[in-house]
Image (cartoon, grey):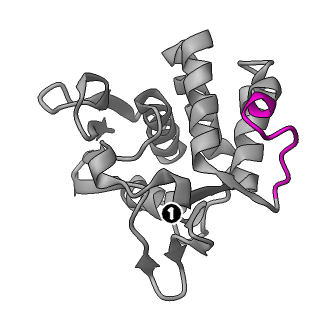
C-alpha cells in the first residue's frame, strides 16, 4: 500500500473533516476525544489542518479497541454530514465524486490536493477510484491509507444517499489491504 502513497508526514487533513468524524464517532466511541488528545490533538479547530498520520492513528485505535464494525458504522455516518454539490443528483455521478471530495479535504505540503477551478488533482494520498459504472453496478478501487472498513462505510452511505437499496461488497476476486494488497475493490449494486 505505501508504494502508491507519498510520505504521509507531508499530508494533512482538514480540521472540519476531523470535526465531522469526531461528532459522528462520539455516538460509537465516547473516548474519541481522548484518543485524539493522546495523539496530540486535544481540541479540534475546524479551520485548521492536522497531520494525517495522527488521524490514521486514531482510526487504528478505534479499530483495535472497538472493532472493525465500529469504523464501518462511523464511515456510514460521514456522508450524512457532507454537503453535496447541487448538480450531483444520481448514484452514477456521486460515486466518482468521492475521490474529489477526499482530495479536497487533504493537503500536501500546504496545498489542497484538488483544485475545483482547474480540476487539477495532486497525488500522494491514494484514491477512491470509480473504475467503472454500468447499468446498476459500479466498481471502486480504494488505495488510500484509511481502514478498509471506514472506506466501505463511506461508499455504502454515499451510494444509499441516492439509491436506498444500494449494496456494497468487497470483491473477493481481488487483493485486499488486510491481506497485504495495495488496495481494496468494492462492487456497488443497485
Q: Where's residue 92, x and y in %?
A: 36, 57
Depicted 11 relative to depicted 54: above or below: below
Depicted 134 relative to depicted 75: above or below: below
42 in the magenta segment: yes
Q: Is residue 87 left or right of residue 7?
A: right
Q: Is residue 94 visible?
A: no
Residue under the image location 40 percent in, 54 percent down: 95
Disc 1, SS? helix
Q: Which residues are magenta?
A: 36-46
Closest to the observer, 100 or 63 = 63
Instruction: Determine which residue is flagged by label 1.
Output: 103
95 in the magenta segment: no
Are there few (<14), some (14-19), or many (20+) residues within 10 Å of tag 1? Answer: many
Locate the N terminus by quadrant: top left
Q: Is residue 7 left or right of residue 108?
A: left
Residue under the image location 59 percent in, 32 percent down: 57
Residue under the image location 63 percent in, 40 percent down: 55
Closest to the observer, 138 or 39 = 39
Q: Is residue 171 left or right of residue 15?
A: left
Residue under the image location 51 percent in, 73 percent down: 114
Q: Where's residue 24, x and y in %?
A: 73, 33
Q: Determine the image quadrant of residue 188.
A: top left
Q: Determine the image quadrant of residue 49.
A: bottom right
Q: Where's residue 166, x and y in %?
A: 40, 35
Locate the C terminus by quadrant: top left
The prevailing secondary structure element of the residues shown in magenta is loop
Depicted 94 relative to depicted 75: above or below: below
Closest to the observer, 90 or 139 = 139
Q: Is residue 183 left or right of residue 72?
A: left
Q: Is residue 73 visible?
A: yes
Amino acid at each position: 500500500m505505501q508504494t502508491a502513497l507519498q510520505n504521509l508526514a507531508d499530508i494533512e487533513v482538514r480540521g472540519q473533516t476531523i470535526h465531522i468524524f469526531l461528532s459522528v464517532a462520539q455516538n460509537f466511541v465516547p473516548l474519541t476525544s481522548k484518543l485524539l488528545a493522546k495523539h496530540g490533538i486535544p481540541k479540534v479547530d475546524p479551520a485548521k489542518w492536522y497531520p494525517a498520520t495522527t488521524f490514521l492513528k486514531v482510526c487504528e485505535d478505534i479499530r483495535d479497541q472497538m472493532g472493525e464494525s465500529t469504523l464501518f458504522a462511523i464511515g456510514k455516518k460521514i456522508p450524512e454530514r457532507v454537503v453535496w454539490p447541487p448538480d450531483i443528483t444520481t448514484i452514477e455521478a456521486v460515486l466518482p465524486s468521492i475521490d474529489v471530495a477526499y482530495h479536497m479535504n487533504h493537503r500536501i505540503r500546504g496545498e489542497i490536493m484538488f483544485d475545483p477551478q482547474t480540476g487539477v488533482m495532486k497525488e500522494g494520498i491514494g484514491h477512491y477510484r470509480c473504475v467503472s459504472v454500468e447499468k446498476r453496478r459500479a466498481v471502486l478501487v480504494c488505495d488510500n491509507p484509511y481502514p478498509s472498513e471506514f472506506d466501505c462505510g463511506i461508499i455504502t452511505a454515499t451510494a444509499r444517499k441516492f439509491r436506498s437499496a444500494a449494496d456494497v461488497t468487497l470483491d473477493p476476486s481481488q487483493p485486499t489491504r488486510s491481506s497485504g494488497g495495495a488496495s481494496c475493490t468494492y462492487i456497488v449494486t443497485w
